[in-house]
Amino acid sequence: MAVRGAVPEVIWARPERTGRGPKPAYTRDDIAAAAVRIADAEGLDAVSMRHVAAELGCGTMSLYNYVPRKEDLYELMVDAVSAEHVPWEPSGDWRADLLRVAHETRALMYRHTWVPRLMSPVYGFSPHALRYLEHCLVCLDPMEASYGTKLELIAMLNGVVTAYVRNELDTAERVRALPWSEGEENAVRIAYLGGRIASGAYPRMAAAFSEDPGPVDLEAVFERALERVLDGFAPR
């Protein structure tokens, strides 16, 4: 529900702390680090103003002097982990460099498995996120295209990485919750699918399975997905 009289603002344009009183006891970096520790250990749903305040050893209401909204806390968290993108000297091969960035992003999301849930353009313009985008654009300097096209490429590549990692994490979470083994479940599902394919109702699916019965190499699929995105932006 909208708050009457509320106005939009950017957390980065605010002073580190509002209100009167002694010198601030914490910095935004301290608050972000505490929230990231909680999310890494217990998941994103465990992050609350109360929990972060307890982690810092301060009162919940005191924390609102630094971070007025939970959404701002999320933005601080995304910026904090974006700092793990350390710029390196591009090779001059924009495809190779963008692939390297994609793999680094994937590794970051595995270190902080809550990140895919918070991937949003709204959080893409924090200080460390801007540094990441600038680095990507430097990697794309050899590519003959407008900056709009380059930003579109970066967004699309990040989208593929995020979707792929989110799917893997969701699958792993589901497997952990199963009352039986993953192998047992796969065997039952494969048997059911085989029966449906053999019924003759799905001739094209039958042809597809005959052509490549599997198993699917998910790492190879990931690599092909990245390459196909890059192919779509290669200068014609």
Image (cartoon, rainbow, N blue to C red):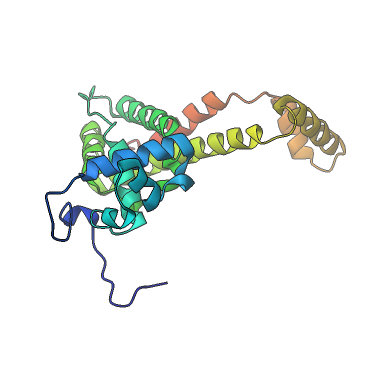
Above or below — where is 36 with respect to 5?
above
Q: Residue at x 77, y 27 (%)?
A: 184
- Residue plotted at (13% across, 60% down): 20
Please provide percent x and percent y for residue 148: 27, 49
Q: Relative to 208, is 193 on the left or the right? A: right
Quarter of the image for residue 115 reads: top left
Position of residue 156 in the picture relative to residue 183 (left or right): left
Tally of numbered tags: 0
Which of 227 and 168 lies nearest the eye of the viewer? 168
Specify the quadrant of the image occupied by residue 127.
top left
Instruction: Identify whether 159 is placed above or below 12.
Output: above
In which quadrant is the N terminus drawn? bottom left
In-image side of 73 versus 128 (left or right): right
Residue shown at 59% from the left, 36% from the top: 173
Q: Nearer the viewer, residue 35 or 143?
A: 35
In this view, the residue in front, 96 or 10, is: 10
Q: Report x, y in % for residue 65.
A: 23, 57
Return the x and y of residue 50 as percentages of the image width and height.
38, 51
Residue that extends furthest to the bottom in the rendered view of this protein:
4
Report if residue 183 is visible in the image. Answer: yes
